[in-house]
Amino acid sequence: MKIIVAGGDGFCGWPTALYLSNQGHEVIIVDSLVRRRWDHELHSNSLTPIATLDERVTRWQELTGKKIKTYIGDLNHYDFLREVLIQTRPEAFVHFAEQRSAPYSMIDREHAVFTQVNNVVGTLNVLYGIKEVVPNCHLIKLGTMGEYGTPNIDIEEGYLKITHNGREDILPYPKQPGSFYHLSKVHDSHNIMFACKAWGIRATDLNQGVVYGLHTEETLWDPLLVNRLDYDAVFGTVLNRFLTQAAVGQGLTVYGKGGQTRGFLNIMDTIRCIEIAAENPAEHGEFRVFNQFTEEFSVLDLAHKVQEVACAKGFDTRIIHLENPRIEKEEHYYHAAHSKLHDLGLEPHLLTNEVLTGIFCSVLEHKERLINENVLPSISWT
Ligand code: NAD
Ligand code: USQ
């Protein structure tokens, strides 16, 4: 298939592009490279030294003979996007290209507005581009489990059967997101759902949980192909942060009580889920929702797991409970359905001590690159 990977220079997008290319698909990366600019803005870095996108795709072609074409530009610029679609005519459009940090969206008004404009307008442009240029193209959009929040009932995959005043309907599952970033994903979902209904667009919304790890088979083939690893308090996600903190001998920063429970998955499962969605496209007019995670853990569960693995490697690791900078429940019910991707063939890589130790060892290799000031949270929700 001809597949666009928008956001293909990022943490999920880069290994996905390599994997799909290695499977024989014709991959085209679209990315504005803005994520690298946010690193500068935040005086932060990837723990792993990452090559430029040009160096990455050149090395990939040298190693495999497979070409990944790149277009550098912003999805918010419709003329650019339209021209890319006219030139490439993709059968699937994988959309990772958004501002994805909840803390970044909560810095101040400017960052909240930027996040929502970047994400919502970018996705609206993609919808219009598909309608105008490639109406058969399947949109595979990265949403987030955080769209649902933490309700006191089971979370379903996108829809909920409701009986009200003696009548029954299947309605979109209620959304209670916890940041202006997570809200941007809800707005996207509503826009996509409407576009499917109005224009017959085919779309899959992948409500992804928190991703951990960094390597996939392909990113290990050469140092120039290495994936980014965020550990800072703005872009670093919780498990990768804990592993990095353990590697440099800092306490594991559990926010509040640590009972916050979320769905998690290995980056190796992210790439496979995208492949599954691409190979099993939604119907015309269908707005399909999959919950993309493999296991549920509380933040404190994860801290204990990291502590155990680090101790086994001779690292003395403490857990510290910081005052929670976020507004969120710290003890709550959490049980979310996630069977649709499994039914289509996903075989999860689960979080064993062996897997954790593997990621921990990768982190140890680059620990001298960590910038200390970036580890503790400084952005508050209030
Ligand atoms: P990332 O920040 O590493 O990568 C995003 C990429 O998109 C970057 O390369 C950036 O330059 C690009 N981009 C952003 N806005 C753009 C725009 N307007 N035009 C063109 N390019 C743009 O993020 P990631 O961790 O790879 O996440 C990818 C997607 O998956 C996001 O939509 C995110 O919300 C979703 N997601 C991520 C996680 C996670 O744990 N990382 C979990 C659930 C969902
Ligand atoms: N947390 C800590 N300590 C830390 C960092 C985080 O206790 O040092 C807690 C947070 O308070 C939160 C939980 O861990 O309760 C998860 O935080 P996170 O930063 O790992 O994840 P989140 O902000 O939800 O965002 C990440 C990605 C985002 C994606 C989301 C999936 O950055 O793009 O949408 O995971 S989900 O969480 O399912 O919504």
Image: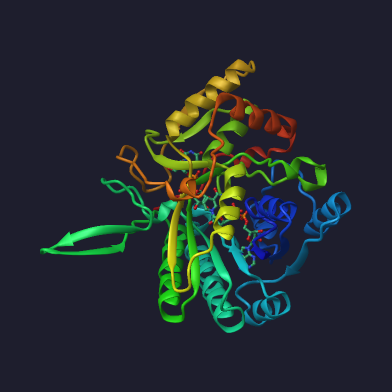
Asked whether 363 or 337 is in front, the reply is: 337
The furthest residue to the right: 62
Residue 179 horizontal/vertical position (percent) = 42, 56
Q: Is residue 205 left or right of residue 22?
A: left
The correct choice, above or below, for 319 with respect to 128 in the image is above
Q: Is residue 284 left or right of residue 231?
A: left
Colour scheme of the rendered structure: rainbow
Rendering quarter of residue 215: top right
Asked whether 365 or 129 is in front, the reply is: 129
Q: Is residue 245 visible?
A: yes
The correct choice, above or below, for 240 with respect to 16 in the image is above
The correct choice, above or below, for 8 with respect to 321 in the image is below
Asked whether 50 or 23 is in front, the reply is: 23
Residue 170 horizontal/vertical position (percent) = 27, 63
Residue pictured at 41% horizontal, 63% vertical: 186
Asked whether 279 or 274 is in front, the reply is: 279
Residue 68 horizontal/vertical position (percent) = 78, 61
Residue pictured at 42% horizontal, 61% vertical: 183
Q: Is residue 248 visible?
A: no
Residue pictured at 43% horizontal, 59% vertical: 289
